[in-house]
Image (tube, helix red, strand yellow):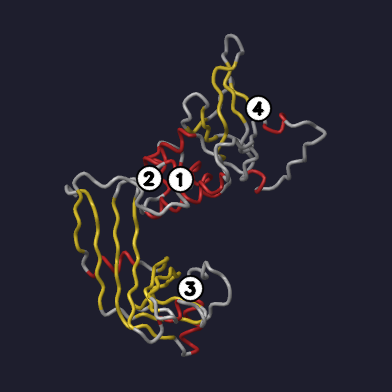
Amino acid sequence: MRAHLGDQLVVESPATGAARRDGEIVGLHHEDGTPPYDVRWSDTDEVTLVFPGPDAHIHHLEHEQSVATREPRPDTHQAETVSTAPRSPRATNPGDIGRRVGLERRRQGLSLVEAARRAVMSPDYLAYLEDQPADPSLATLIRLADALGTTVAALRGGGMDLPPGQGYALLHPRLRDLAPEECHTLLSTHGVGRISVSASDGRPAIVPVNYEIVDDAIVFRTAPDSVAAAAAETEVAFEVDHVDDALSQGWSVLAVGPASVVTEPEAVRRLAQQAHTTPWAGGEREMWVSIRPTSLTGRRITPADQ
């Protein structure tokens, strides 16, 4: 017995030969397609590890394609790790769901195994979902959202064009100040923050930038003629925050300090090599600006009983 991802496992009744149960194969444990398989059952949407018995057979997805239009499946490992299952119209771009699931899982500090356990699914299927353009069912998305402390709408990207904080406030919120050590932890190594500057016309402006943390300094790169470049050689405020709409919680960190242009060639080279990402705005942005915080404060909103 050999299968590919997306094939259907059918378990028949020994007495009548009729299909008793069926499900989609969503995980392979051997490169040659031999059992066992991770199967997402159509009746429960649960993913389980299955060692097929004599009453089971594989309904290959390629059998549903006409001979005239079917393309031969290449005999490579890649062919067995990319699902060819037809996609339903539930999501505009199913691959985006996997990226959001992976991002939220890492944000929560969960391993694949722990997140899969919470969502009652196979770790292999969760890994497949994060890496491939899969189209999980609504039941699967509900379990994932619950396991990750978010919403199905968020995993589908439904609020992508809305500002955060659309949810209701907590009934009994608690607002507390953060210690400098916790502020450093929340700044982490990189991300997107907002810098407050005085633009060339003298008006205040707040600009989002991709930033890095290097040697306790906040650094970002920009273009010399950009609004963010006005931060150079001035005292600025730099803010980072996160809002969890599903739980109505969040935090913010504010750094204040002098900003300066990094001009030493070796320092510029090291910053470029260590950067986690290029500026999302694109274009030529090779001017590095460094902020040395003299003040680092933050706040967090949580339920009163936490």
Quadrant in which residue 60 is drawn: top right
The residue positioned 30% from the left and 55% from the top of the image is 250
Which residue position holds label 2? 150
Which residue position holds label 3? 275
Q: Secondary structure at mark 4?
A: strand
Residue 246 circle label: none
Q: What amino acid is found at the position of numbered circle 4 in the picture? A: His
Sequence-first disc among 1 and 4: 4
Instruction: Residue 61: give x, y in percent of width and height.
Output: 67, 32
Instruction: Residue 145: give x, y in percent of width and height.
Output: 40, 41
Q: Viewer-proximal residue, 227 or 107?
A: 227
Q: Viewer-proximal residue, 167 or 138?
A: 167
Q: CA distance from mark 1 to mark 4?
A: 31 Å
Residue 59 circle label: 4
- Classify residue 101 as left or right of residue 29: left
Q: Viewer-proximal residue, 116 or 233?
A: 233
| Above/below status of 277 relative to 12 | below
Q: Secondary structure at mark 1?
A: helix
| Above/below status of 139 relative to 102 | above
Q: CA distance from mark 2 to mark 3?
A: 29 Å
Q: What amino acid is found at the position of numbered circle 1 in the picture? A: Leu
Sequence-first disc among 2 and 1: 2
Residue 155 circle label: 1
Q: CA distance from mark 2 to mark 1?
A: 8 Å
Q: Nearer the viewer, mark 2 or mark 3?
A: 2
